[in-house]
Amino acid sequence: MKVERVRRLLQLLTLLRSGRAFGADRLATELSVSRRTVFRDLKLLETAGVPYKFEHDEGNYRLESSMSLPPTHLSMDEALALLLATRIMMTSTSHPMYRAVSDAALKIESGLPGPILEHCGEWLEGLDVLQEPMSSVETVADLFADLQAALARRERIHIVYDSVFDGGEIRLFVDPVRLIFATRGWYLIAWSHRHDEYRTFKVDRIVSMEFTGDGFAPHSDFSCEQYFGKAWRMIPDGTVYDIRLRFDAEVAASVEEIQWHATQRTRRDDEDRLIFEAEVDGLKEITPWILGYGEHVEVLSPNELRALIRDKAAQIVANAQVAEKEANA
């Protein structure tokens, strides 16, 4: 939801809770929007479970008196943090339960004192979050809810999965153990009875899912820390490498200020270049990250990583040469 609309909804709640008479025209004037926008915002409040009443005799709108909530004793900063998390950071592109979160937030906001609502609306106007590109979650909202139910009930499920590794759809029974958000998308970690091991499944590649009605014992031996180990992101391959990279001074600060990996160590050399070291399980995931820094980074070790980067860079050059020839043909 855009920040402007968040602020407008806060203003609308404040107006309706004020006890004063507001018809559609006056609300439109107060909010500096059209009557159509007012009706759309009122419908959003109603959908979220924040009912208003329309007084037909007077043509005015008010919040139902039953909407007063028990005191929450939120401070200005606490209310602002709540609205920032639910209105700006948790967007429809990042969380399948965004609509439920948004509805719950509207209900809480309707019970906040007017001065706090006004204060938060003013401060939210100056805040925004630029979301990283990520997989859309709109199409998997229902599936996400079913996966949560299976996790809560410890119920075995049957899934049809579009597997990149297997080159097509596979069918398998799995025991779900975790839903995690990582590397710009949601993933299910489950015990695969077909593979007799824990496997990771991208949620938006699950074609279909069926409950089996069969329960399973808790997988008490599972932990995300052990499962991912020292992988750069999510995919260990069983071989740990001592990675040593050298970034030039131009990008050194931007690299060292971020915790890219749990094992990383950084230091500057005499020429203010950054020496980056880490123990990483597998080379496939870290390779695109290194290539993203182009001419600003050198691979010092291991030799296998240096060769992999060299081959990828050579292929990039070859592709560019082919494209140039085609453009000039």
Image: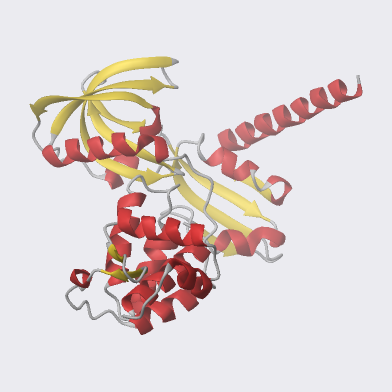
**Quadrant showing the C terminus:** top right
Q: Residue 232 location, x and y as percent? A: 45, 44
Depth order, front residue of 231/101: 101
Count of numbered circles on the image: 0
Please tell me which residue is depicted at 13% across the width and 32% down the height of the picture.
155
Q: Residue 188 location, x and y as percent? A: 30, 36
Q: Residue 145 location, x and y as percent? A: 26, 39
Residue 246 placement, left or right of 193: right
Please tell me which residue is depicted at 15% across the width and 42% down the height of the picture.
152
Depth order, front residue of 43/222: 43
Residue 79, compared with residue 295, is above or below; it is below
Residue 33, compared with residue 159, is above or below; it is below
Residue 148 placement, left or right of 202: left
Residue 47, compared with residue 280, is above or below; it is below
Q: Residue 137 location, x and y as percent? A: 41, 40
Depth order, front residue of 205/97: 97
